[in-house]
Image (cartoon, rainbow, N blue to C red):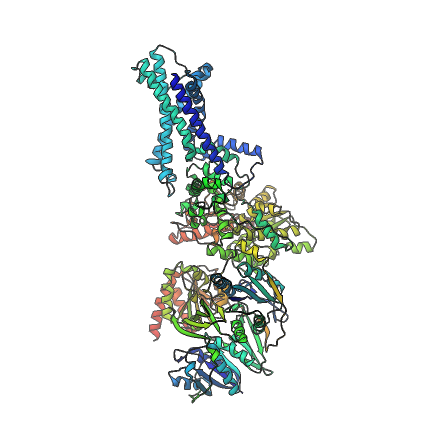
Amino acid sequence: MKIIVCVSCVPDTTTKPTFIENNSKLNEQGVQFIVNPYDEYSLARAVALRDANPGSKITVITVGEASTEQNIRKALAAGADEAIRINAKPINAQYVAKQIAHVLKEIGFDIIFTGKESIDYNGGITGNLIATELDIPYTHSVTSLEVSGNEAKMEREIEGGKEVVKSSLPMVLGSQKGIGEPIIPNMMGIAKARTKPLTVKEPIAVEIPTLLVTHELPKPKGAGKFFKAEGNVQDAVNQLIESLSKEAKTI
Amino acid sequence: MSVLVYLDSANGALRKTAYEAVAYATHLGQEVIALAIGNIENTQSLADMGKYGASKVYHINDEKLKTFANAAYASVIAQAAKELNCKTIVFSASSIGGVIAPRAAVKLNAGLLSDINVLPKVENGQLIVGKTVFSGKANATFSLSGEYNVISVRPNTVKPSETGSPVNVETLNISAGETDFRAVAEAILKTSDKISLTEADIIVSGGRGMKGPENFYLIENLAEVLGAAVGASRAAVDAGWRPHSQQVGQTGKTVSPTMYIAVGISGAIQHLAGMGTSKVIVAINKDPEAPIFKVADYGIIGDAFEVVPALTEALKAYKQKIS
Amino acid sequence: MGIISQIVFTAVFLGAIAYFILQAKKLYKFIHIGKPLDRSDNKAQRIKLMRRIAFGQSKMFTNVPVAVLHFILYVSFIIINIWVAEIVIDGIFGTDHVLKVLGGFYDVVMAIGDTLAVLTVITCAIFLIRRNILKVKRFSGREMTKFPRTDANLILIFEIVIMLAFIFMNAGYIQRCESAGQQYAGMYPFSSLIAKAISGMSTEQAHIFEHVNWWVHILGILLFLNYLPKSKHIHIVLAFFNVYYSRLTPKGKLSTMPEITDQVKAMVDPSHTPADMPERLGVREVQDLSWKAILDAYTCTECGRCTSVCPANITGKLLSPRKIMMDIRDTVEVSGENLLKSIDYHENTSLLDRISHEELWACTTCNACVEACPVNIDHVTSIVDMRRHLVMERSEAPAALNTMMSNIENNGAPWAFPPSDRFAWADGLDIPTMADLTAQGKTPEVLFWVGCAGSFDDRYKRVTRSFAQILKAANIQFAVLGLEETCTGDPAKRAGNEFLAQMQAMMNIQTMNNYGVKRVVTACPHCFNTIKNEYPELGGNYEVMHHSEFINELFKTGKIAVKDGAFQGKKITFHDSCYLGRANEVYEAPREVLQQLDADLVEMKRSKQNGLCCGAGGAQMFKEAEKGNKEINIERTEEALSLQPDIIASACPFCMTMMTDGVKKKKFENESIQTQVFDIAELIAQAELITK
């Protein structure tokens, strides 16, 4: 089985983003990039799938500049067999999907894992776009995956419940937490990752009619109204209800 | 030119997000055409879309399209957009609309933005839309310049209001290709969540301060009085106290309810990212220095185990008084 | 003695000796199943240590009455060799009290021996009572069942029987001589009393009586000799070796794994090609231990001093450091023979079949066990080595520690805080960074290493600011690294992730060496310990001081002073940080600093070397405590509050958190508690403010 895991490198979750060039770009100075958490879930499930299907291979693919290689090595340390880096800045989901789809058409695929979203621009669409470019099915926010033969059975998260989805292979899925526990690479994995193949490919030219114009930080909030429960809980509770009903009008 | 709005439906009924999508589309300053696919039992509800701003409502009730399949729905909607000359297509960024939108966008080679949470503008013929990025830590504005543009709107972004009157519902005959059914839903499994987090108007969340899963009944009781959904912080989920489906924050759900009540949640940056856009934030925490108070509009500094039961009782009394 | 008796004795004696030599050889080989470890250095220091701790039993004397009793047994063990020599000569050659030629000296030796024999019997009886009737707590525990319990009693009974036989033998000898009208050799203050009791015996009868007891005595000794290698009691021999081969580095220093350094170098410098990774990292099987760790296990006499001071054990957790030693020994016992045939033998060799993850993760690495052990057993090294295996080879750390480690990897701190906020504590304070000063061509006297808690924890940021205020008041030219600082690696290292710890160390060392840093001061004992003890092997050599030492020096050199009576009438108790105290033996500096405050300093019962951990060391800060019946910090807080202090002073960010939380919880139960927790720097800064 040809297993593909699409990996996106995103700012660490603690990052307080700031912006440069008229607020059009993220200021990457001092920002630590990590493997997108949802891609880690993907990778974990992919490794188990590979191990259960002898002869399978996991290829990690990313669109990113050379600085992403450190994170790609982490994915290799966690168990992927080889990696492809498409040497370009990931402009947006549509751009990334076209680049990845182009390479995947060359190398072939059976099952393509993406994260349900990346935690930078939170689009949640890249996997679906890749699937559409490749004209194969896509299932979003998948929390469990079982593959037998040419068919996959998945559970995906929907509002207020889960949906059981059946899909034929090849297919793309967007992993949600629960599909696999992120793998903490052991030392052997880290040592081996150093020599696993990492191929760099140049991007194709594509035109995308979506443009990020500007970023801004949310306006800081004014000081809130706080009541102390110490001594008299009932007073504090009544004051809160008074405020919520008269000022905030939320109850 | 018109705007095409896809109406979310499930189990034979329109969803709340369908109304929101129509309400959002009215802000684009064009004729709003609503489109439903699959079985809708209450046809009046389709006609009622007129009340919320749709000037036309189409329904595609193909037998094959009864169960949701994003690829099939996407190709049908893309064809409909072409036939009806709609250059902008609006979806809800729900688990239904949200997964059709990108697919339709590729079919139409369209500009695309998902999970929008601010009202649109049109400048120099370009559609200007915005959303939160970095899981709520920043906002970003995008311009879409495709011949077609596809957008999906985050639940709770607009409140639908009745402004017009019902319209006729017309049937549209478009069918999907055979290969569009390679991934289909087989069954729905309900979880215990009574109200879905992303769509809830009010959310009550508990964190590490709840000390253990056995104490979450306090959160549930409060939520019940408020008709709220129950959420949890990453700490509570990682400790195995609550299911991941209830996790609010980065790597969990990003929510923007009208009111968010955080109980025993200190307010790590990852949590703030996921609920920072809530309209009113209420914090209940022992520690007055907890970062949650920096973003809270209201709060009680005190022990959750005393405050929450008292608040629940007082709210019950208050609700009885006003009803 | 008849010739037959002589032949029989000679045969028995030589047989017993031969068998003992066989057993000793086997023991030696079993110990050397362990991996090589060089402890051939510092001979003079090692001999001194052995003299003090093994011969002088210095560590026993923390409990004087028990130490005295134990000393009696120890001395009689030494003295016994003199009369045994005589017995052996008599037995082989048929002589009678051959050493009486020593004359007056013989009298003295026999008088001492006789007295010791009686004292030994009494002592052993007391010990039996302590174990079986008074049921002293440290002799119980889930590992103290079956053989270990029998073993202990058996040894005591053995000793009683041997000594009683000795006394009776002497009484018989006295009566034999007396009734024959001869003068007996030697002096026997106690046996002579027994002799009076049997004064009715004829010479012949007394001779038989003497002879029987002679045989009981010597056979007892020979049997005992051969029982020793099968028993915990072998400590009477191994203790000397174990102490001689002690780890001489500060207790807080964990070993540096060179195979990991090699890998880290390859990460930092792609041109470096590392050697193949060993298949085993850390310790899983007994053959992964060092020979010293196995020697530790064989030296353990199951006295339970370690377990009785272990904060995890005290609070009902599964960990018992004694059990770890016993498990190691038991594992070697069952697999040793096979391992000697082939080191690739893997059945019943895994320590983790006996030692659970729960036990390993309960350790706070506070070193109370190591401190308490009278024979210098190093439990913590073995525990951490097993953690290293779980984490680096198996990726089996508790989830919370994985989160901590990915935080370090991703944002440079064990908590998830934005790295861009690291220097936020200094907002508005005009604190110079190394980068600023270097750009201006200046070199500060000292680098103030702030640490992650000092940078991000709201409570500890106040300590950071207080210390910066003191430095400024003393006109010290200092600088901080600001955003260039990152976690020292301490929690990762203690959690067993040597790789991550060394990555952090390498980064920090590179940063500090680039600035030519010579002196470092920090308010975090964990940073202090790591930079001071663990960085040198990785190329970071600095003079490192804890802020308590630094402030103390400022007082001593007159660079700062506080107004008299600033805290007069206030009762302060100081809680020792394990990583400052036991780990690095800094006990006096923080106390001397506190003395400047004119306050009423009171000590907790468990203080200094015997201080009780707050519960947060060894990466415990970042995980839930293992199952037990109490939180460690509550145990410690209760001890502190029992003194009714106004202030609990601490000198460590983790202690600060744990004690503050503990006091908060106790306040919840009892609102009248007014005690506050402050860092020593805060107290000085508060006092300082009064003087200005």
Q: Image quarter for residue A152?
A: bottom left
**Residue C157, x across and y down, in percent:** 35, 30
Pick the front one: C279 or B209: C279
When the figure is inspected, residue A147 is found, relative to residue B38, above or below; the finding is above
C336 vs A203, nearest the viewer:
C336
Horizontal and vertical percent position of residue B132:
53, 71
**Who's the residue at 53% across and 47% down the image?**
C525
Residue most toward the left? Answer: C200
Return the x and y of residue C207 as percentages of the image width and height.
34, 16
* Residue C176 visible in image: yes
Count of marks placed on residues:
0
At x 37%, y 31%, the residue is C156
Q: Is residue C359 above or below residue C165?
A: below
Instruction: Find residue C258 and report its horizontal and vertical position in percent.
Output: 58, 47
* Residue C78 vs residue A28, the one in the foreground: C78
Q: Is residue C554 above or below residue C435?
A: above
Q: Is residue A221 above or below residue C415?
A: below
Q: Residue furthest top?
A: C181
Q: Quadrant of the N terminus of chain C?
A: top left
